[in-house]
Amino acid sequence: MYAAGAVTIDMSRSVATATGDRFGRVGAGCKRFLAVPFERQTYRNLAYLLLAFPLGLAYFVFVTVAFSVGIGFSVTIIGLVVGVPILAVTLALALGIAGFERWLTATMLAVDIEPKTDLAGETALEACWSVVSDPKTWTAVCYLPAKFVLGVASFALVVTGLSTAVSLLMLPLYYDQPGLYVGVVSERAPEFHQTLYLGWNYLLVGFDAVVTLGYWEVTTLSEALVAAGLGVVLLLATLHALNLLARVSGWFARLLLEDSYDPLAVVQRPS
């Protein structure tokens, strides 16, 4: 009898512990979801992603134009005198820019990326060849135009997500302004047509389903407050999406920039 009672008590405690752990995990997840606007790293990630668009555009133009000009001059024997130095200077500048990106990623995303500072070879020509023949050199060069893709994605997410969330959040302040329509308003309600055709006994039988979406317009304070609540959720979700994009960006930078030669690190290294 006492043993059965002990087993019952232990099972009750186990169920209570499992339930408490489940609620604890749910509460911790909700806390992390709500705390994202109050974390300093969130705004560092946002700044990093906002910088990605202008920097990525500049990198893309620099790499494509400089390498195109250098390769274009290097096609002819006479052009080698001009083309090879252009390619060499372009490669050196690209590695320097990659070093700056390595520093920027470590500073703003707290992702440490180790560079290469020692070159193989005893002569200057052998050292230069070790840089050119290193695959990590070209992954660092490829990272520069690839950052433009990251910049476009970041800009689109910031513009669509944050701007929409802020607009919804501030909706109670301006929804009742005269001459202002807030919501999904158009001259005609949008319609979606789904059509299915079946052949039967030399006949073509069709089925057409029409789904019409009605108008939605914010006209009362209660509707504006509901929209503002949706704006809060959208704002939090967008910030989490931006943090995720920043983590992916840090991983991508480490993948392409790790162990590549960094002339800036060589200059800053103490003798």
Image (spheres, rainbow, N blue to C red):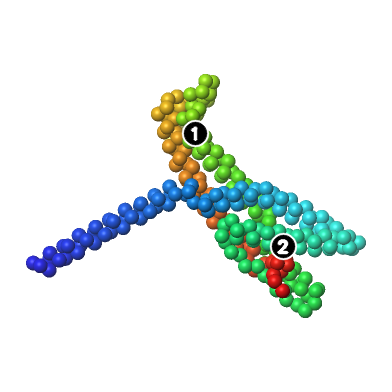
- Kind of residue indicated by mark 2: Leu
Quadrant where the C terminus sits is bottom right
As drawn, the residue found furthest toward the left would be 1
Above or below: residue 131 compared with residue 143: below
Q: Single out the mark in the foreground, 1 or 2.
A: 1
Q: What element carries label 2?
A: helix
**Crowding near pointer 2: few (<14 within 10 Å), some, many (20+)?**
many
As drawn, the residue found furthest toward the right would be 78
Q: Quadrant of residue 125?
A: bottom right
Above or below: residue 146 compared with residue 137: above
Q: Mark 2 points at which residue?
A: 95
**Crowding near pointer 1: few (<14 within 10 Å), some, many (20+)?**
some
Place of residue 36 in the rendered image (x, y in percent of width and height, measured from the top left): 47, 49
Q: Residue at x 52, y 20 (%)?
A: 178
Q: Quadrant of residue 112?
A: bottom right
Q: Residue at x 47, y 34 (%)?
A: 194
Above or below: residue 60 compared with residue 173: below
Q: Quadrant of residue 163?
A: top right
In this rendering, would 270 be left or right of 29?
A: right
- Kind of residue indicated by mark 1: Met
Q: Residue at x 84, y 62 (%)?
A: 85
Question: Which residue is at the front of the view, 16 or 192?
Answer: 16
In this rendering, would 1 be left or right of 37?
A: left
Q: Earlier in the sequence, mark 1 or mark 2?
A: 2
Q: Name the residue under label 1.
A: 170
Place of residue 193 in the rendered image (x, y in percent of width and height, measured from the top left): 48, 32
Question: Which residue is at the front of the view, 155 or 42?
Answer: 42
